[in-house]
Amino acid sequence: MPEVFKDYVKNKFRSSGPLKGVRVLEVCTLLFGPSGPSFLAEMGAEVIKIELPPVGDVTRSLNPFGWFYKEQSPMFMHINPNKYYMALDLHIDIAQQIFKELAAKSDIIEFNLRPAVTNRWNIGYEDIKKVNPGIIYIEKNGFGQWGMYAEQDRPSNDGAAQALAGYAWISSFPGRPPLKQPIWICDYYGGLMGEVAVLAALHHRRKTGKGQFIEMSQHESMLNTLGRAFMDYSMNKRVQGHWGNRHPSMAPYDVYRCAGDDRWVAITVPSDEAFATLCRVMGRPELAEDPRYATLVERYEHRGEIDAVISAWSCNRDAREVMATLQAAGVPAAELTHQEELTEHPQLLERQFFQRITHPAAGTHRYPGPMGKFVRNSLVPVQGPAPTLGQHNREVLCGILGLSDEEYRALEEEQVIGTSYLESAAAS
């Protein structure tokens, strides 16, 4: 452990996050939109998530197989930590005025609605700039705010983005249909790239005092991940084939069965030296001298033969043993971790990656931890990943905007705000 991190575990929640004092208004749904402000919340920003009553964020009711835990959505709970939750009907004039009052006291506003929706609600960038010229305002959606797809008002989501960006096409195995990744790679990566832009704008404002309007296309953000495949075609007009678990620039590079029930290890060999080491560990040093395998080009042509040799060696060995042996020799290797093993993984436990969080309805469970570790600033401990719809209405309206109890009750009666679940429960 580096010396500067020796007291990290003891002190990790004792100081404020590096973004303390930054206030974010979020009007986002599903995953692409909310994931970005969640990254900022982990680093100490105050994020106010505004949902439209009575349903709120679609992810509250969107789950695999329609399965919920104690009437809560695990998907929603994971993607929305450390936020204040306000139910505000932005179709109503007075709600739009409340939003502008909050915007005047905020640093960043994030939307992932279809183009022109914010203008119809009178909270577009030009409207907000009048009350807060320094606002950093980002609109992110499938195809941006302009261009043919935006003008056609096309919807999008992670699956559509993987398909249209070419990601699903290159992810498949030879002779098989295209393969979409089961994780929401476009939602998380796109959300993260949005926050890179937001933090750059925040830095620019601190230097110049000027705000910024950012528009972001999820489709375009994903194209950057194609990297080599995109440039290879651009430069050489060469189309990348379907590689599956293999790699177009390394060999051997695959997953190999080990002893036990469905145990595997990934072995990736980046150089001739690493291949010679692998051969020595397997007890087959002569393979590194074989002209069929001596260099990458030759190994690539005969990768099926090499894979068969590695599989014959690994299939009678424990996956963790194979990983440890190869890593100790300097060859990149890792056992494939089953999903049920992740929450007890010794590496993650030693680094105290997980947090135990108590949700008012779902109870106490283990959640993924923050994405980075800072020496001089702590990250924010998750207090509750997914409060109920409108749970913080009173804190936001009375605490930040200074509304009286009478004004607050009037907004409830006029259905400008959704009634807080906790307040409703207390009243009943």
Image (spheres, helix red, strand yellow):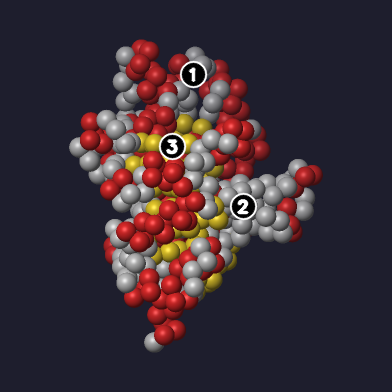
Task: Tell me which residue sits at (46%, 56%) in the image.
Answer: 101
- Which amino acid type corresponds to the residue marked 2 in the rendered image? Gly
Q: CA distance from mark 3 to mark 1?
A: 48 Å
Please tell me how many numbered marks the rendered image carries: 3
* In this rendering, position of residue 76 left or right of residue 296: left
Query: Which mark's residue is nearer the viewer, 3 or 1?
Result: 3
Q: Residue furthest right?
A: 3
Asked if labels 1 and 2 touch by Cβ distance under 8 angstroms, the answer is no
Task: Single out the residue that lies furthest toward the top.
Answer: 236
Neighbour class for label 2 at 10 Å: few (<14), some, many (≥20)?
Answer: few
At x 31%, y 51%, the residue is: 121
Q: Which residue is mark 1?
A: 296
- When asked about the image quadrant of residue 179, the answer is top left
Q: Nearer the viewer, residue 26 or 301?
A: 26
Label 3: few (<14), some (14–19) or many (≥20) C-alpha neighbours in 10 Å: some
Indicate the position of residue 157 as horizontal and vertical percent values.
Answer: 30, 45
* Left or right relative to 223: residue 322: right
Report whether residue 321 is seen.
yes
Which of 398/264 is in front?
398
Using the numbered discs, state the Cα–Cα distance from disc 2 to disc 1 in whole angstroms. Answer: 53 Å
> Is residue 167 visible in the rendered structure shown here?
no
Q: Nearer the viewer, residue 213 or 186?
A: 213
Residue carrying label 2:
21
Contact flag, marks 3 and 1 (Cβ < 8 Å): no
> For the residue labelled by badge 1, is the local secondary structure a helix, a strand or a loop?
helix
